Amino acid sequence: MSDLKLGDIKKKTSALFENVREQVPLIHQITNYVTVGDCANVTLAIGASPVMADDLAETEDIAAISSALVLNMGTLNERTIASMLASGKRANALGIPVIFDPVGAGASGLRNKTAKKILEQVDISILRGNLSEISFLAGQKASTRGVDVSAADAENDGTAIAQNTARQYRCVTAITGAVDIVSDGERTIAIKNGHPMLSKVTGTGCMTTALTAAFAAVSEDYLAAAVSGITAMGVAGEIAFEKAGDRGTGSFRIALMDAVSMLNSELIEARAKVEEA
Amino acid sequence: MSDLKLGDIKKKTSALFENVREQVPLIHQITNYVTVGDCANVTLAIGASPVMADDLAETEDIAAISSALVLNMGTLNERTIASMLASGKRANALGIPVIFDPVGAGASGLRNKTAKKILEQVDISILRGNLSEISFLAGQKASTRGVDVSAADAENDGTAIAQNTARQYRCVTAITGAVDIVSDGERTIAIKNGHPMLSKVTGTGCMTTALTAAFAAVSEDYLAAAVSGITAMGVAGEIAFEKAGDRGTGSFRIALMDAVSMLNSELIEARAKVEEA
Amino acid sequence: MSDLKLGDIKKKTSALFENVREQVPLIHQITNYVTVGDCANVTLAIGASPVMADDLAETEDIAAISSALVLNMGTLNERTIASMLASGKRANALGIPVIFDPVGAGASGLRNKTAKKILEQVDISILRGNLSEISFLAGQKASTRGVDVSAADAENDGTAIAQNTARQYRCVTAITGAVDIVSDGERTIAIKNGHPMLSKVTGTGCMTTALTAAFAAVSEDYLAAAVSGITAMGVAGEIAFEKAGDRGTGSFRIALMDAVSMLNSELIEARAKVEEA
């Protein structure tokens, strides 16, 4: 794919790590109560600043001081759905990137309806989910099993789905899994970092979304921002396993946060496995 | 007690650890926002898969894909009480076990009323709480002090209360404390694993409930499932203290999650202190 | 300042650590879902007992069994604002100290309005926030940037603002930052413990508030209680860095909880840097 300029993407990706730490962007997150503490901590660990505010009455004020917005529908309800839609529209009006994590899309009518409503009413900059979730949004036959990817979907072609979804919703689409795929519809990237332990602790998907938002806040190239966010989590996962080894999932989770907080552009350049998909 | 067949219970209990890891059951949890992240992580650590969904609008859909339901009233409110009742009834209709953790029963009228409503309207498979909470539900004089067990209650006779409660509500009742008691009204078991440090970190009760649900999802013998869940937490607590020692409660909490994630049937067989009560 | 009697304050401060562990006061906390688990764990770590209950329907019952109330508006919404006001009034009627953490005051109209409403309708014993938040409540020009202190505010005179706010709202005011300032309007104390890493993990402010509430529950000298809470977090932060060093923010956060759980009056006497402001 002649448009890709993989070298440029890699260079941008690694530079974004310094940009976040210099600019300390404020990231507004309407997210779920399962992983919200981890999302706040990972936002601080990468060098950005989190603000978790989900009440409709403060949507506009918080949007006005933020540099990116995360909409994560992990534990959605009527009250927070209204806030997500209003915040998303406000972020659009202010030109702030919106990163959407459709947790559990395909698992319930409420989640399906909400995901579609958000995609219809809000211009999404980056859509990040697992293969089941994105397949569902792409209109493919999907079999979401709770919030984890199903074995059946793992056989689908992530690359084609990411490309089609990116074109359909005019956004960068990131499908994370054993191999991560990121596409803006034209350029498509595969990232081969990560470790199986990342699926043994809750919130690594949500945290990847939060990291992606931090990078999107400091770059208008959302493909590079998504690649940075996903590479950060993948490389940190590898380092965490090197440190925590077989001690168990508690130690791995702490080592993961440690690793994110110690990331820098040199480490990313040395370890990133970013390829054309 | 000639019906007990303690050897059978022990054999089943240890076998359940393999069953969970093979079947990876999806555990639907309507729980509190204090310990929800720990509950999700402990569910993953034991080899099951968590889905935290508390909105009434998705109750039926989530129940349809789940293998067990947890109702934990730690931070209850009007919205989640309605969801607990609807989810419980739906789980009953689908034949999915319901595990009820009446956090703080006895501490407020709202909690008392809610616990009674759940016990009236939903068939509970396993009821797990501390002595104050279960004493209150048994109609005994109880003095719940917040969410922790009161000293006065610690002197009560847990065995009789567990047996009576089990008969009254036709469910397995588990009272956790220095010695844990599990009864189905006929068979009554005492478990003498655990460590005092377990009471120094929040959520060990909630996590025990989540573990119990994972085992109930893969066995129709709910007595064995409760024994497995409680033994898992007790043995993990002992191992955690051996690892974290006197470093403090932060390290103990991480070592506890590590230990749960490394449990297996051999470890349980070697360390479980399961006796007739 | 002849009224200060710094030696008395120091003596009281260190004695409070033993008082908490002896009395194990129950601390009612209406707080945010980002840091609530850490607040519960830190409350246990210092030797008190947490109860997180935010539904209006159980306000009065929970107040009646508690020894202090925390109002933390980190993730406020219509439902919890009503509960905060009702709980605060009830605590006042029962003579229980109320500790108010105005998270993000200055960042949105909703937060500003809520903070003012709480200060008008509830007698606050201790107000704890960062310089931006307290400056806003003092009517100073403030520029709250999300939930973290802004660089512009860092140049303001924290001492004068703490004193004025204490007089204005007739409460002990604590401003935490690189140097912490505590004032009751007459006596003003500076605390020079702490470590920059404390600002790299979420919830250290919220946890300081929870600790302060535990001490206020066992002392009627709220200045000493606030000094104890803030010194506890500062000393623990120093010890945590000595233990976790450069491993990263995940390990620091665990070491911080370890350190709080191992604090005692000797350690505080040896390390506290408490001075006249």
Image: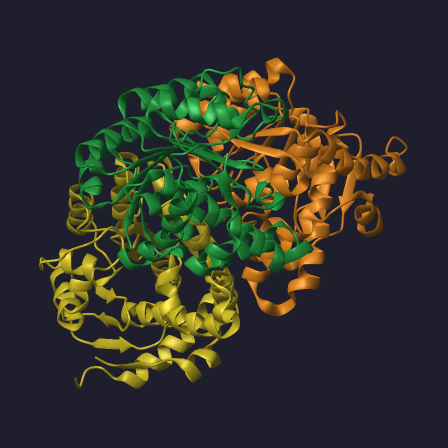
Chain colours: A green, B orange, C yellow
Residue C149 visible in image: yes
* Quadrant containing the N terminus of chain C in the rendered view: bottom left
Q: Nearer the viewer, residue A273 or A229?
A: A273
Q: Position of residue C242 (x, y in %)?
A: 49, 75
Taking the image as shown, residue B217 lies to the left or right of residue C133, namely right
Q: Position of residue C277 (x, y in %)?
A: 21, 79
Q: Residue at x 38, y 65 (%)?
A: C198
Task: Tell me if residue A264 can be seen.
Answer: no
Query: From what the image shows, is residue C242 above or below residue B40?
Result: below
A265 and B99: which is toward the camera: A265
Image height of A139 relative to A199, above or below? above
- Among all residues in the image, which is located at the extreme front? A2
- Could you say where residue C215 lies in the image, as x and y percent from the top left? 38, 65
**Horizontal and vertical percent position of residue B238:** 71, 57
Query: Which image quarter: residue B13?
Result: top right
C123 over C265 or under it: above or below? above
Q: Is residue C2 left or right of residue B109?
A: left
From the viewer's perspective, is A266 left or right of B194?
A: left
Q: Nearer the viewer, residue A178 or A143?
A: A178
In percent of the image, x 75 and y 27: which residue is there? Answer: B219
Q: How many badges with numbers are in the image?
A: 0
Q: Is residue A89 above or below residue B248?
A: above
Name the residue at 84% across, 39% down.
B10
